[in-house]
C-alpha cells in the first residue's frame, strides 16, 4: 500500500454498514468493515481485530471427532450434562493445571465460552431478588459486556488500571456494599490488556465474594498463557492462578478455542465449584422447579438454549484433555508461539512511536501473549482507529472493552508469516507519515 485510503471511502463503507463511530463498533462489525475495504482497494489488511486462533487445531481432537462421527454419533442427541469421559477427563485436567478439585459431576460442556457466560449471567441475575446487577472488571472481552444488555440485565463496570493490589478491595467494596451485585466477571489473563491478576488480588476478590455472597465468573480462555512462568507440566507447580483457592462461590470457564485452537467446533467447559453446584436457591425452585444451581444451569438454561453441546466435539475435547494430562500433548508449548508474535509486533509499534497503554502488571512489565494494547500520542480512539484503517490496519478500540483509556487492542494471532510482519511495518510507517502531514 503506497498511499493511505481516502477518507471519503472509509466514510462510505462505514455508512453502508450503519456505523456512525468506528470506535464503538463491535469486533464483528470491525471485521465486516475491514473486509469491505479490502474489496474496495484490492489489497489485504493487517488484521489485528479478531482473536481467531493462529495455530492449527490439535490433531488429537480432530482424530477423536472423526472416529466419533464414524461411529454414528451425529444422529444421536448428546447427554446435556456432558459425556462421562469428558467430565472425568476435565476434572483431571483442572487438577493437573489449576490444582483444584472439582468433581466430574460439576463440569459441564457448553457451546463455547460465549454460551457458558451468557447463561451464567442470566442465572446469577435470578438467584436472589435483591441482587440484580453484574459487575465487570474491565477492560474485558467486549462480547461479555454486550450479554447483559441483550438480556436486559443491569450491569456496572470499572477499569482496573488504577485499582491494583489492595486498591482493588476498596473498589470492590464500593460496588458490593450496596447489596445488589449478584456476580462479578473478569478474564485472567486479561483480554485485551493481558494483565494477570496476582494471588493477592484473587484472594481479595474471593474474600469480597464470600463477604457479600457474590458468584465469581472467572474466564480462563487463555489458561497457562502467562509465559513469564512455565505452567506446562501437569500436576507440577506453578499452576494457573485462580480465585477458586479463596472462595467456593465460583464458576471457571475453559475454552477449547484458544487452549487447543479448536474454535470452529464451539466447545467449552463451565467448571462449577462443588458447593455452588449443589447450593439450593429458593428463587430458582419457585420459578423453575429446580433449586440447585448446577442442575438448574444444565436442565433449564442450557436445555432451552441449545439442548446440549455438539456430540462429536465432546469426544474431541475429551481426547485432548486426556492427552494434556498424560503429557502426550504440550498445549502450552504450542501456544508460546503467540508470545513470539507479540514480542516482535510490539517492537514494531514502539519503533513507530506507539506506546503500551496497559504496560505494567504490578511491578512487572506486561507479558507477551495473545493480546496487548497500544496508543499513539494523544489521539482519541475514533481518530486512531480511522487513521489505522486508512493505512490498511484493522483493530478494536479500547472503549468497547470497558476501558477508560485511549488506544487499541492488538491481537497477534493472524500475524502468521514473515511477510505479515513486513506488511505491518510498512503500514505503520505509512501511518506515521499520515500523522506527520496533518501536523
Image (spheres, rainbow, N blue to C red):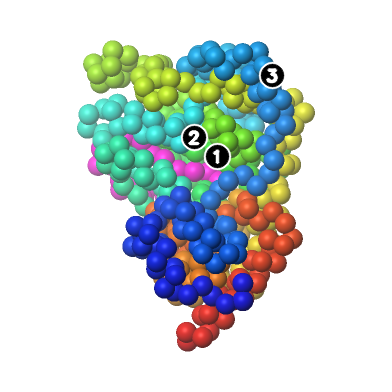
Q: Which residue is mark 2?
A: 113
Q: Position of residue 354 (x, y in %)?
A: 56, 71
Q: Quadrant of residue 313?
A: top right
Q: Residue furthest right?
A: 328
Q: Quadrant of residue 186?
A: top left
Looking at the rendered image, the disc whose residue lies closer to the viewer, 2 or 3, is 3
Q: Indicate left or right for 75 with 158 as reference.
A: right
Q: Nearer the viewer, residue 436 or 374?
A: 436
Name the residue: 60% across, 64% down. 43
Q: Which residue is mark 1?
A: 221
Mark yes or no: residue 92 visible: no
* Mark 1 neighbour density, 10 Å: few (under 14) some (14–19) many (20 or more): many
Which residues are drawn in magenta?
Answer: 167-189
Q: CA distance from mark 1 to mark 3?
A: 27 Å
Q: Earlier in the sequence, mark 2 or mark 3?
A: 3
Q: How many marks?
A: 3
Q: Earlier in the sequence, mark 1 or mark 2?
A: 2
Q: Nearer the viewer, residue 210 or 158?
A: 158
Q: Position of residue 179 (x, y in %)?
A: 25, 37
Q: CA distance from mark 2 to mark 3?
A: 25 Å
Amino acid at each position: 500500500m503506497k498511499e493511505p485510503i481516502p477518507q471519503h471511502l472509509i466514510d462510505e463503507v462505514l455508512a453502508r454498514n450503519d456505523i456512525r463511530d468506528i470506535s464503538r463498533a463491535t469486533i464483528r462489525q470491525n471485521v465486516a468493515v475491514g473486509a469491505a475495504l479490502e474489496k474496495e482497494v484490492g489489497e489485504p489488511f493487517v488484521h489485528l481485530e479478531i482473536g481467531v486462533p493462529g495455530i492449527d487445531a490439535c490433531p488429537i481432537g480432530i482424530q477423536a471427532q472423526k472416529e466419533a462421527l464414524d461411529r454414528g454419533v451425529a444422529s444421536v442427541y448428546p447427554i446435556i450434562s456432558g459425556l462421562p469421559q469428558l467430565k472425568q477427563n476435565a476434572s483431571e485436567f483442572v487438577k493437573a493445571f489449576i490444582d483444584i478439585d472439582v468433581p466430574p459431576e460439576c463440569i459441564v460442556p457448553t457451546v463455547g465460552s460465549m454460551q457458558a457466560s451468557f447463561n451464567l449471567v442470566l442465572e446469577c441475575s435470578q438467584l436472589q431478588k435483591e441482587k440484580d446487577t453484574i459487575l465487570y472488571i474491565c477492560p474485558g472481552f467486549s462480547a461479555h459486556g454486550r450479554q447483559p444488555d441483550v438480556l436486559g440485565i443491569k450491569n456496572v463496570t470499572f477499569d482496573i488500571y488504577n485499582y491494583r493490589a489492595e486498591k482493588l478491595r476498596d473498589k470492590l467494596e464500593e460496588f458490593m456494599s450496596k447489596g445488589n451485585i449478584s456476580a462479578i466477571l473478569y478474564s485472567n489473563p486479561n483480554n485485551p490488556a493481558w494483565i494477570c491478576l496476582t494471588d493477592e488480588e484473587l484472594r481479595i476478590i474471593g474474600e469480597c465474594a464470600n463477604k457479600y455472597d457474590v458468584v465469581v465468573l472467572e474466564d480462563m480462555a487463555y489458561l497457562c498463557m502467562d509465559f513469564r512462568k512455565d505452567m506446562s507440566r501437569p500436576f507440577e507447580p506453578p499452576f494457573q492462578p485462580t480465585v477458586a483457592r479463596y472462595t467456593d462461590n465460583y464458576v471457571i470457564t475453559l475454552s477449547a478455542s484458544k487452549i487447543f485452537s479448536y474454535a470452529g467446533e464451539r466447545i467449552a467447559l463451565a467448571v462449577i465449584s462443588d458447593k455452588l453446584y449443589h447450593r439450593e436457591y429458593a428463587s430458582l425452585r419457585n420459578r423453575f422447579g429446580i433449586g440447585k444451581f448446577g442442575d438448574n444451569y444444565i436442565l433449564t438454561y442450557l436445555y432451552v438454549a441449545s439442548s446440549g453441546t455438539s456430540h462429536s466435539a465432546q469426544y474431541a475435547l475429551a481426547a485432548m484433555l486426556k492427552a494434556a494430562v498424560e503429557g502426550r500433548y504440550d498445549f502450552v508449548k504450542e501456544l508460546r508461539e503467540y508470545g513470539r508474535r507479540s514480542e516482535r509486533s510490539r517492537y514494531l509499534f514502539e519503533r513507530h512511536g506507539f506506546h503500551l497503554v496497559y504496560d505494567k502488571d504490578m511491578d512487572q512489565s506486561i507479558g507477551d501473549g495473545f493480546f496487548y494494547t497500544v496508543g499513539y500520542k494523544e489521539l482519541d480512539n475514533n481518530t486512531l482507529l480511522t487513521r489505522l484503517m486508512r493505512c490498511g490496519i484493522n483493530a478494536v478500540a479500547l472503549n468497547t472493552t470497558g476501558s477508560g483509556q485511549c488506544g487499541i487492542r492488538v491481537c497477534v494471532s493472524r500475524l502468521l508469516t514473515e511477510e505479515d510482519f513486513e506488511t505491518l511495518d510498512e503500514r505503520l510507517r505509512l501511518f506515521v507519515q499520515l500523522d506527520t502531514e496533518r501536523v
